[in-house]
Image (cartoon, rainbow, N blue to C red):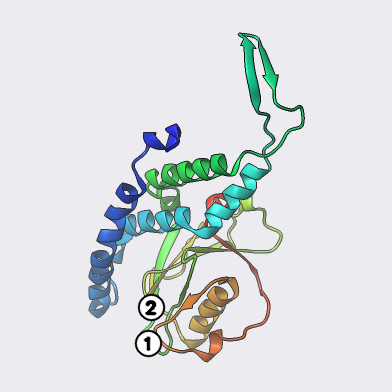
Amino acid sequence: MAPELESLPSSDETFSELENQFPTVRERLLSLRRKAFRNWTKYLPFLLRYMDMLRARSPLFFRQKETEWKAVQTWTIEKVIDAKTIKLESMEPRPPSDTFIKNKTVFQMREEIQKSGVWLSDLNWVLRYTDSVDEPFVISESPFLAEISPGVSEANALKHPETLLYFPVCWQVCLFGSSVRFDRGTDKLETHDMTVARRKYRVFAREFLISPTKLDDITDLPGNDAQLNAAAGSAR
């Protein structure tokens, strides 16, 4: 193991608490359905931590970090001659090794998870739900998504009023986040809005899409209608 990885908890320690608690929190949240999900926000701090864990573990996070590190130019020291003199293997710079990139990315992933999703608490969050399994929320390999309007830079995306974050807790419930306040804290989505939500996940999905039932509106869709990015590191 690389030395820098030893300073943070192992992956199992980092993930196990959230993974073990999530089913219980989800069921408690769903138990509020009879009261139209009143007081659902008491579960929000945990859900923000869970969402951020999924972000940091997502394939997109790893792809982004790999791209960032491969753009870094490095030189390898062949020999340290004295306190002020070194000999390089070559004067030609090259990207870090694959092992280095992997270790640094894993370290950054663990480091992100240790922040417990604090950055997400600065946003406004609402709950939307559906009553029918025939009109469910769906999920892809990157369940936590940020929809960014064309022309908005990733550096400013989180604070942009048109950026919208999505996190389906299950097929019945989805959380929406934004830098601006929503009109209603809790609401049921109608058929049209559910179709739009599914289209967004269908357009983004690269590997798979999970639904509790077969849906015609998420098969064989044409190209992207908006710039969709998973809420990975650059979405801050």
Q: Position of residue 150 (x, y in %)?
A: 69, 63
Residue displayed at 67% across by 53% down: 153
Badge 2: how crowded within 10 Å, few (<14), some, or many (20+)?
many
| Image-based side of 94 in relation to 111, left or right | right
Q: Is residue 158 visible?
A: no
| Image-based side of 84 in relation to 18, left or right | right
Question: Depth check: 99 or 73 in front?
Answer: 99
Whether 103 is drawn above or below 166: the answer is above
Q: Position of residue 42 (x, y in %)?
A: 27, 60
Q: Is residue 184 visible?
A: yes
Badge 1: how crowded within 10 Å, few (<14), some, or many (20+)?
few
Q: Quadrant of the N terminus?
A: top left
Are dots 1 and 2 in contact, CB under 8 Å?
Answer: yes
Q: Tell me the number on the disc at residue 171.
A: 2
Q: Residue furthest right?
A: 92
Q: Position of residue 127 (x, y in %)?
A: 38, 70
Of label 1 and label 2, which has the lower sequence position? 1
- In the image, what residue type sits under mark 1? Val
Label total for image: 2
- In the image, what residue type sits under mark 2? Trp
Determine which quarter of the picture holds residue 63.
bottom right
Whether 68 is drawn above or below 48: the answer is above
Q: Disc 1 versus disc 2: distance between alpha carbons?
A: 7 Å
Question: Depth check: 97 or 198 in front?
Answer: 97
Q: Tell me the number on the disc at residue 217.
A: none
Q: Tell me the number on the disc at residue 133.
A: 1
Residue displayed at 26% across by 60% down: 20
Q: Secondary structure at mark 1?
A: loop
Q: Secondary structure at mark 2?
A: loop
Q: Position of residue 87 (x, y in %)?
A: 69, 18
